[in-house]
């Protein structure tokens, strides 16, 4: 019923602004609409603004209407689009994987600034989701050997597809770090282990936007309030057995448990444990060295 009202780019901006006002603020609606229109029309954000009278054909209008209806349910725009950008690369996403976020880009950047270049390192990503971490690391340093695990077979399908999409050679294995079994992953050593594991507590959940709680995979997000550092303990234990001497362990963390996570690593024998804030000033990532 809205097709007649979205004949031009300007009409689309107005319609999205009206229909999404109870979900997002004006700036977010503008950004979302620009993303969708850029994807459909191939016009830049500047061109969309300069040429608001650009006409939309019937196919474009129908697609925008479908996307608008999805957005009205609270679905994140990345799922609506089916893809997102991460570290300069394109990754397909669906409801089986978390949407890659800027904080994780900061973690990847920290890893790349830490490890020697072109040195043929062995790197493992635990809980890979869309595969954004290992694929980005591989594309920047092709000489390194990248491995990744996830408990979800559906997530691994997306990760494998993203690796093919970006022409990155990654070894993916379905595995649960909480009950790791003998496999290719558990039978070797690594120079770097990295993980952005589930860390959102029930208390955190109450503060989260519905487009995260209602759509992103809960197994990749939530941990019990009674054991919020469950995965950090398990991954740190795994790292003590599978990191090369002077190997690195990198974590993305819950901002509320930075010092507690640092303490876990110190108690397990890691050294040079560094807690770093993200661009928003929140405790978000940790780097530690295994020297035992």
Image (cartoon, helix red, strand yellow):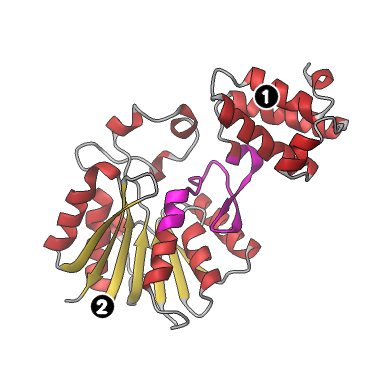
Q: Which residue is mark 2?
A: 246
Residue 195: percent from the left, percent from the top? 36, 58
Residue 67: percent from the left, percent from the top? 68, 31
Residue 89: percent from the left, percent from the top? 60, 59
Q: Quadrant of residue 53?
A: top right
Q: Which residue is mark 1?
A: 16
Residue under the point 34% across and 27% down? 206
Q: Is residue 28 visible?
A: yes
**The magenta stretch spans residue 271:** no
Above or below, 236 against 227 in this view is below
Above or below, 123 against 90 in this view is below
Residue under the point 57% across and 30% down? 27
Quarter holding the N terminus is: top right
Extent of the magenta region: 78-106
Q: Is residue 174 visible?
A: no
Q: Nearer the viewer, mark 2 or mark 1?
A: 1
């Amino acid at each position: 019923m809205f097709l007649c009202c979205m004949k031009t780019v300007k009409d689309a901006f107005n319609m999205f602004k009206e229909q999404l006002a109870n979900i997002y603020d004006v700036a977010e609606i503008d950004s979302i609409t620009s993303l969708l229109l850029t994807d459909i029309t191939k016009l830049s954000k500047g061109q969309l603004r300069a040429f608001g009278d650009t006409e939309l054909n019937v196919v474009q209008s129908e697609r925008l209407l479908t996307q608008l209806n999805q957005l009205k349910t609270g679905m994140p725009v990345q799922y609506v689009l089916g893809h997102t950008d991460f570290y300069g690369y394109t990754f397909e996403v669906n409801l089986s994987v978390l949407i890659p976020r800027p904080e994780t880009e900061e973690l990847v950047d920290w890893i790349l600034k830490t490890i020697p270049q072109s040195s043929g390192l062995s790197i493992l990503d635990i809980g890979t989701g869309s595969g954004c971490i290992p694929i980005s690391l591989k594309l920047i340093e092709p000489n390194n050997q990248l491995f990744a695990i996830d408990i979800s077979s559906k997530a691994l399908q997306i990760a494998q597809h993203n690796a093919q999409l970006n022409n990155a050679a990654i070894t993916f294995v379905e595995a649960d770090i909480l009950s790791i079994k003998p496999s290719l992953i558990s039978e070797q050593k690594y120079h770097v282990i990295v993980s952005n594991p589930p860390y959102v507590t029930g208390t955190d959940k109450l503060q989260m936007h519905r487009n995260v709680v209602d759509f992103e995979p809960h197994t990749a997000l939530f941990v019990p309030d009674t054991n919020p550092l469950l995965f950090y303990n398990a991954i740190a234990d795994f790292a003590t057995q599978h990191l090369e001497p002077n190997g690195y362990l990198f974590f993305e963390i819950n901002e509320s448990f930075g010092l507690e996570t640092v303490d876990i690593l110190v108690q397990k024998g890691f050294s040079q444990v560094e807690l770093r804030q993200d661009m928003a000033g929140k405790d978000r990532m940790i780097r530690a060295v295994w020297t035992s």
